[in-house]
Image (cartoon, rainbow, N blue to C red):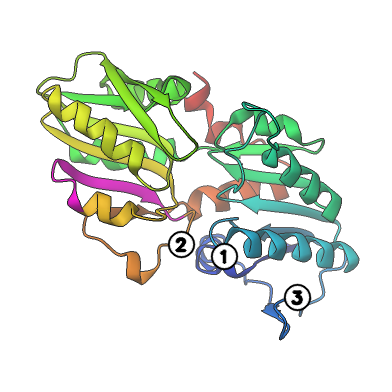
Amino acid sequence: MNGLAIFSGNASKELTEKICQSMEVPVTEVFVGKFSEGEIRVQIRENIRGKDVFIIQSTCPPTNDNLMELLILIDAARRASADRITAVLPYYGYARQDRKDMPRVPITAKLVANLVVAAGANRVLAMDLHAPQIQGFYDIPVDHLYAINVLCDYFTRKNFKNMVVISPDVGGIKMARAYAKRLGAGLAIVDKRRESAEKTEVMHILGNVKGKIAVIVDDIIATAGSLVEAIGVLQARGVKEVYAAASHGVLSGPALTRIRDCKILKEVVITDSIPLPNAARNPKIKVLPVASLLADAIKRIHNAESISCLFDEVRR
């Protein structure tokens, strides 16, 4: 791992340490703080001239602070004469606004892409983007990883009988089909109508779910409103138990209360792409590590090796 430098902002410090432990390399020392008026202050405290730099930062809440930290870290690395800068975004914030679906609205996913490139990034490594087309918003290489193997391995060990994988909407069918194929389970779809950015109304379930153990798969769990509504309809259709799996546990607003109060929901399985505060610890929430997946991708990128083997399962 000669010529490699890995560091992060405040959003992904623990994940970065796990990645570096997996790779058996030290974390490059950086200072990320604030001036008295709130402006972000950054200093890279080691020489990174001519190095292959990986900056690991999820743009999770507080989203604006973490995004600015990422941009300033990239700028600092560029001005420190790094040879190549890869922005590693385990969770890509502002991704839900990826198209103009109403008049006079922004496309923030594209705006963030422009900012990352303008700051000086040469490459992006992301995991489970909310919309795959975000890769096309960049004019630099984007490697897109998936947490499907990590999540499926967990449910395989549970050895459920009579399992059905649930797609929370039509847009998630491809991913849900990949889960169902990997788990050897059936597939069903929640048909829902979105009333606003934060509220959806579940219409009906497409597929046989009666008497089965349902696993709802999604990329993000934010307020858990859609999740709980879907679970209510599944329960009315005779589902025996419900589990939820998501790559990114944003868990904002009333999410924790909704998860706790939903009796038929046995477990919510997420990854550590977003740090889960101690205050949010809940016996129903299971956090799976993705450090080894990201470490493997970073190694392969650094050594100019293919990383397609890390996500071939989803393409099939």
Residue under pointer 3: 42
Q: Is residue 175 above or below residue 262?
A: above
Q: Is residue 253 above or below residue 267?
A: below
Where on the picture, by quarter, is residue 80? bottom right
Query: Which badge, 2 or 3, comes first in the chain's sequence?
Result: 3
The percent position of residue 23, horizontal first and vertical second, equals 57, 60
* Magenta-drawn segment: 261-272
Mark 3: few/some/many CA within 10 Å (<14, 14-19, 20+): some
Q: Position of residue 4 (x, y in %)?
A: 73, 62
What is the distance, in whole Å, between disc 2 and disc 3 at their CAs?
21 Å
Check disc 2 and give the amino acid type.
Pro
For marks 3 and 1, the one nearer the N-term is: 1
For the point 58% across and 56% down, which residue is it? Answer: 58
Q: Look at the numbered discs 1 and 2 and tell me whether their residues touch, using CB distance below 8 Å.
A: yes
Q: Nearer the viewer, residue 230 or 179?
A: 230
Q: Please tell me in which quadrant of the rendered image residue 226 appears.
A: top left
* Quadrant of the rendered image containing residue 247: top left
Q: Position of residue 246 (x, y in %)?
A: 39, 41
- Report helix, strand or loop for mark 1: helix
Q: Kindly check if marks 2 and 3 are in contact, taking CB atoms under 8 A apart as contact.
A: no
Look at 61% across and 67% down and name the residue there: 25
Judge left or right: residue 50 versus residue 26. Answer: right
| Image quarter in which the N terminus is found | bottom right
Q: CA distance from mark 1 to mark 2?
A: 7 Å
Q: Is residue 267 visible?
A: yes
Residue at the spot 63% in from the left edge and 27% down from the top edge? 102
* Mark 2 crowd level (few <14, some 14–19, many ≥20, 10 Å Cα): some
Instruction: Give the amino acid type for the residue marked by disc 1 in the picture.
Output: Ala
Residue at image mark 1: 11
Q: Residues within 10 Å of mark 1 (few under 14, many from 20)?
A: many
The one nearer the camera, 214 or 306, is 214
Question: Where does label 2 land, which residue?
Answer: 275
